[in-house]
Image: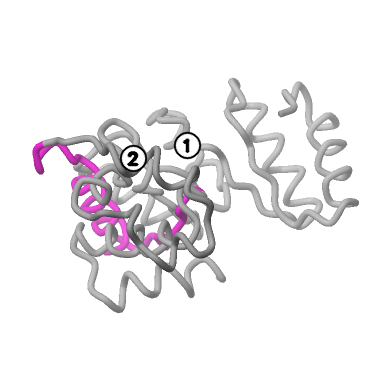
Amino acid sequence: KAITTSYEDALGHLRRMKAMGAFSVKSYNQPRRDARQQIVEAARELEMMVVPEGGSTFFFNMTHVIDGHTGVEHNIPVAPVYHDVLRLWGAADDVGYTPTLIVNYNGLNGEFWFYQHDDVWKNERLRQFMPANAIVPRSRRGLMAAEDDYTYVETSRAAKALLDAGVKVNLGAHGQLDGLGAHWELWMLQQGGMSNFEALRAATLHGAQ
């Protein structure tokens, strides 16, 4: 992680990354808006994409949209969303949204819902490709919570509302559980109201675009 202090600083970091083959950069919790803007401007010059860490910081997230980042990674920690957010983001020039419900901000992670409702550690195909010590500790002794404690569903509904407002919603599973995480994320997008087609489009076309 590099703290950016000037446009020249941002340009230097991005040139180094591009020389190593990068076509995008993650702007990771830069504490100042002007630094985030410098990274975006340097990326435009170098024809790179910029995806900021959402960081559970709603007001930062709105400036991510206003300043023209390629997308926002992780969910905004506010749900439901209202016309101010829907109109702002819907009017932005192709700023995508990857809510990453599996590690939902401002509530229980979606990942825990699946451990509560399924014996994940018994999945034979998963066990064939992943070591037991990566599966069993997190899934065999799962969290028990009331269904309405799983606020990722409300976050998913907000993602659907943003989709309807014209925002490209993408699927991202955070690398939480190889083999199943992306499937879970797909289903969680659906739990918020996306149709089969809309969820599959979020998982494929939108990310590619």
Total numbered circles:
2
**Res 76 quadrant in image:** top left
Instruction: Identify which residue is drawn at 44% across, 36% down.
Output: 61
Q: Is residue 152 magenta?
A: yes
Left or right? Give the position of 188 relative to 2: left
Where does the image place residue 141, in percent across and percent down from the top left?
Answer: 28, 37
> Secondary structure under badge 1?
loop
Mark number displayed over residue 54: 1
Left or right? Give the position of 38 relative to 122: right
**Which color scheme is applied?**
one colour
Determine whether 16 is above or below 4 in the image. below
Give the Cα separation between the discs numbered 1 and 2.
Answer: 11 Å
Amino acid type of the residue tagged 1 in the rendering: Gly
Where does the image place residue 205, in percent across and percent down from the top left?
Answer: 48, 75
For label 2, the crowd category at 10 Å Cα-Cα, with few meaning under 14, some 14 to 19 and many 20 or more, is many
For label 1, the crowd category at 10 Å Cα-Cα, with few meaning under 14, some 14 to 19 and many 20 or more, is many
Seen as rendered, the residue at the extreme bottom is: 197
Where does the image place residue 143, in percent across and percent down from the top left?
Answer: 23, 35
- Name the front one of labels 1 and 2: 2
Q: In the rendered structure, which disc, 1 or 2, sits on the residue that comes first in sequence? A: 1
The residue that disc 2 covers is 104
Where does the image place residue 98, in percent across and percent down from the top left?
Answer: 44, 52
Instruction: Identify which residue is drawn at 50% across, 60% down.
Output: 94
Amino acid type of the residue tagged 2 in the rendering: Asn
Q: Are marks 1 and 2 in contact (CB under 8 Å)?
A: no
Instruction: Identify which residue is drawn at 32% across, 69% down.
Output: 199
> Secondary structure under badge 2?
loop
Instruction: Identify which residue is drawn at 31% across, 73% down.
Output: 198
Boundaries of the magenta span = 146-174
Left or right? Give the position of 170 relative to 198: right
Mark number displayed over residue 35: none
The quarter of the image holding the N terminus is top right
